[in-house]
Image (cartoon, rainbow, N blue to C red):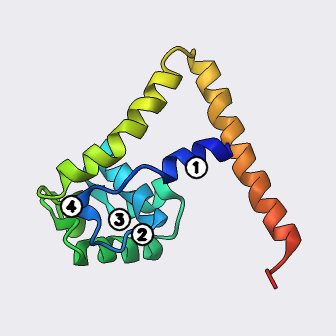
Amino acid sequence: MPRMVGRAKKIPVPEALRSFPLAPRHLSLLSCLLFDGPTTVNELAARLQVAPTTASLLVGDLHGMGILDRREDETDRRRRIVTVAADQEPAIRAWLAPGAAAWRKALDPLTPDQRRMFVDTLLAYEAAVGEARQDQGPAS
């Protein structure tokens, strides 16, 4: 796991995006939009497992940087649809797509049950790390 994280961190940010103050929290959101397509803030919040207000703040950050676009939902004008800005999509795709391709390559040979076990194992690991941090209490 540390090697995987280390390799992911070494993927260079494309030149077109280097001037933006992007944080890891932005990458998850961008990945969702890139691979799942345009969506609402509430749907992003559910996918990212964060509060809608948190997703809204992240979208606001990225929209302010010109990385995301927001438009009215034509079927419900109260909703806003969020998408990667067309002029930023090539750089974001070049940056994030290799990771998605690697996951597909790793997961394609597995049966659906094996994939489910793999995902469940990662979720269990994530939960255990969270519990261990809670048990340690606040950092001094």
> Which of the two marks, 4 or 2, is nearer to us in this view?
4
Task: Residue 16: give its label.
Answer: 4
Residue 39 in which image quadrant: bottom left
Q: Position of residue 131 (x, y in %)?
A: 81, 61
Query: Is residue 41 visible from the viewing direction of this image?
Result: yes
Where disc 2 sits, the SS reads helix
Q: Position of residue 26 (x, y in %)?
A: 40, 64
Question: Which residue is depicted at the point 42% across and 69% down?
Answer: 55
Left or right, residue 69 beside residue 20: left
Nearer mark to the viewer, of 1 and 2: 1
Q: Are marks 3 and 4 in contact (CB under 8 Å)?
A: no
The secondary structure type at the circle numbered 1 is helix
The vertical placement of 124 against 70, above or below, is above
Residue of label 3: 41
Residue where numbered disc 1 is placed: 6
**Residue where numbered disc 2 is placed:** 55
Q: CA distance from mark 1 to mark 2?
A: 26 Å
The crowd level at tag 4 (other Cα within 10 Å; few <14, some 14-19, many 20+) is: few
Question: Dot 2, how many residues are within 10 Å of its Cα: few (below 14), some (14-19), or many (20+)?
Answer: many
Q: Position of residue 109 (x, y in %)?
A: 52, 14
Q: Residues within 10 Å of mark 1 (few under 14, many from 20)?
A: few
Mark 2 vs 3: CB contact within 8 A? yes
The answer to whether residue 82 of the structure is visible from this angle is no
Q: Give the Cα separation between the discs numbered 4 and 2.
A: 24 Å
